[in-house]
Amino acid sequence: QKEVEQNSGPLSVPEGAIASLNCTYSDRGSQSFFWYRQYSGKSPELIMFIYSNGDKEDGRFTAQLNKASQYVSLLIRDSQPSDSATYLCAVRGGGYNKLIFGAGTRLAVHP
Amino acid sequence: KAGVTQTPRYLIKTRGQQVTLSCSPISGHRSVSWYQQTPGQGLQFLFEYFSETQRNKGNFPGRFSGRQFSNSRSEMNVSTLELGDSALYLCASSLNFGAPGEQFFGPGTRLTVL
């Protein structure tokens, strides 16, 4: 079992719709959760992070964390073609553990 | 504030050679992590440095090594290059070591081994 799992996609959504990206992790002691966006040929860009159970909203983005289910998600409202990218979920265990990345979900927003 | 910088941006080497890549973190950031990204394997953790000491290490052979200087700048070295080492090498910096540990990536060094 991989430490951080994501559906590779592509996830295709129409412009203006809500895109829902999911991630599960295996280390129950994980404490920090991050979402990165990576455009083709570019480096990953941090868009959201969450530490506590529940929802965290930032503009069109909402991160949701459920530690009991070991599940973290990213919702993108009013999806735009410019949101088309690969979204990487990253998880850090407690204390001084390294950051582990999932393989990423490719999102395609079509006009 | 300037972001993470990596040099060189592109590199072409032949099998058996060695290479050194450089990373300057965001000003004030003291932790530097290195990753290898390939289409097949995704983003693989190499190592993490803080206060000039390697704090975490990924599952890579000993041909991959790194170091961090007192000004937090970091270098990684790959010796005896293999074709499979062709990848995008990414450096990320964070303020301190450990959780929560938001990391910010540099533009990467694209290494091609012929």
Image (cartoon, coloured by chain):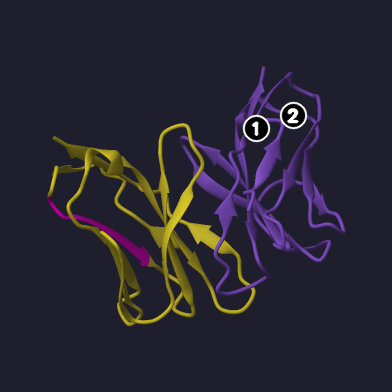
Please provide percent x and percent y for residue B36.
60, 42
The answer to whether marks 2 and 1 mark residues whose Cβ atoms lie closer than 8 Å is yes
A39 and B111: which is toward the camera? A39
Mark 1 chain = B
Tell me what residue is drawn at x 65 percent, y 56 percent: B58
The residue nearer to you, when weighing A24 against B59, is A24
Is B87 covered by the magenta stretch?
no
Residue pictured at 56% horizontal, 78% vertical: A94
Q: Is residue B95 positioned above or below B33 on the image?
A: below
What residue would you read off at disc 2? B81
Image quarter in which the C terminus of chain B is found:
top right
Q: Provide the residue span drawn in magenta.
A: A17-24
Q: Which chain is yellow?
A: A
Q: Residues within 10 Å of mark 1 (few under 14, many from 20)?
A: some
Q: Is residue A1 visible?
A: no
Q: Is residue A26 left or right of residue A84?
A: right
Going by the numbered disc 2, the residue's amino acid type is: Leu
Answer whether residue A35 is visible to the viewer in this image.
yes
Task: Give the label on residue A30, or none.
Answer: none
Magenta segment, principal secondary structure? Answer: strand
Q: Decide: few, some or many residues near mark 2? Use Cα within 10 Å; few <14, some 14-19, many ≥20.
A: many
From the top left corner, tell me how far across and down residue B30 is, in percent: 73, 63
Q: Secondary structure at mark 1?
A: helix
**Residue B44 falls left or right of residue A45:** right
Residue B53 sits above or below residue A28 on the image: above
- Residue at left offset 46%, top offset 35%: B39
